[in-house]
Image (cartoon, rainbow, N blue to C red):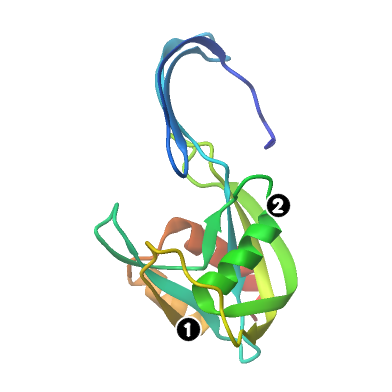
C-alpha cells in the first residue's frame, strides 16, 4: 500500500454498496488525530494509464464520451485493474482495446492518488514506446465511445493550458512523461 498509510479506527459502517467498478461506503471513523465523524469513500481497485508515443513523437490519446460529465473528454488510454491483474497487464490490454496499438517498450512513470478526498484509487502511469498498429485490434467494451487522437506534445500542452476538457490523470501523466518527450 502507499507510503504514509495510517489506518483510522472503524467505529461503525453505516452504508456499503458493491458496484461494478468500485464500492462505496459511509463509515463512522476515529482519525489518527482522535477526531470522529462520518466519511464517505469510494473503494477502487486502481487503474493503469499509458502515455503512448509513436516513432514520430506523436502522442496517442482518446476522446471518450463520459456519462458522468455528459460529454467527451480527451484522455490517455487507461483502465481499471481487474481481478489479480498487475498494472502493466491492465494497460497492455487497454491500449490495444482503446487505440488498436501495442507497445514493445514500457517504462513506469510513477503512481499517484486520483482523488484522495473521497477515493482510494491509485493510478499507475506508464510510458509506452515502440508502438505497433495491430492488424486486428481486440473489440472495445460495449459502453465505450472512443475516437483516437494524435497530438504532438506541444499541441497537448497548448490544449491543457487553453482549458480543453482533459482529465486530471492524463494531465498529471503527461507532465511525468514530459522529460522523456524532448
* Residue name at image x 52 percent, y 67 percent: 77
Label 2, residues with CA under 10 Å away: few <14, some 14-19, many ≥20: few
Q: Is residue 85 above or below residue 117?
A: below
Question: What mark, if any, has residue 86 been given in the picture?
Answer: 2
Circles 1 and 2, Cβ within 8 Å, touching? The answer is no
Instruction: Give the mark nearest the N terminus, 1 or 2.
Output: 2
Image quarter where the N terminus lies is top right
* Residue name at image x 55 percent, y 74 percent: 138
Question: What mark, if any, has residue 151 been given in the picture?
Answer: 1
Counting labels gives 2
Q: Is residue 57 left or right of residue 11?
A: right
- Observer able to see residue 59: yes
Q: Is residue 96 left or right of residue 141?
A: right
In the image as oriented, which residue stretches furthest toward the left? Answer: 70
* Residue name at image x 68 percent, y 51 percent: 85
Question: Where is residue 101 shown, x and y percent of the image?
Answer: 60, 80
Question: Where is residue 152 shown, x and y percent of the image?
Answer: 51, 85
* Residue name at image x 37 percent, y 61 percent: 143
From the viewer's side, name the closer residue of 174 and 26.
26
Q: Nearer the viewer, mark 1 or mark 2?
A: 2
Label 1, residues with CA under 10 Å away: few <14, some 14-19, many ≥20: some
Image quarter where the C terminus lies is bottom right
Amino acid at each position: 500500500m502507499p507510503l504514509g498509510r495510517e489506518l483510522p479506527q472503524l467505529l461503525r459502517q453505516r452504508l456499503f454498496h458493491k458496484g461494478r467498478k468500485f464500492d462505496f461506503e459511509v463509515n463512522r471513523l476515529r482519525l489518527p488525530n482522535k477526531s470522529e465523524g462520518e466519511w464517505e469513500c469510494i473503494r477502487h481497485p486502481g487503474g493503469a494509464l499509458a502515455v503512448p508515443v509513436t516513432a514520430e513523437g506523436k502522442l496517442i490519446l482518446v476522446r471518450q464520451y463520459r456519462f458522468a460529465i455528459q460529454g467527451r473528454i480527451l484522455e490517455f488510454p487507461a483502465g481499471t485493474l481487474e481481478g489479480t491483474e498487475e498494472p502493466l497487464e491492465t494497460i497492455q490490454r487497454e491500449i490495444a482495446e482503446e487505440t488498436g496499438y501495442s507497445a514493445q517498450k514500457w517504462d513506469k512513470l510513477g503512481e499517484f492518488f486520483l482523488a484522495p478526498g473521497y477515493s482510494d484509487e491509485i493510478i499507475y502511469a506508464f510510458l509506452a514506446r515502440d508502438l505497433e498498429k495491430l492488424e486486428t485490434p481486440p473489440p472495445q467494451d460495449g459502453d465505450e465511445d472512443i475516437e483516437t487522437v494524435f497530438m504532438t506534445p506541444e499541441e497537448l500542452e497548448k490544449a491543457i493550458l487553453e482549458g480543453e476538457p482533459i482529465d486530471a490523470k492524463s494531465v498529471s501523466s503527461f507532465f511525468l512523461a514530459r522529460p522523456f518527450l524532448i
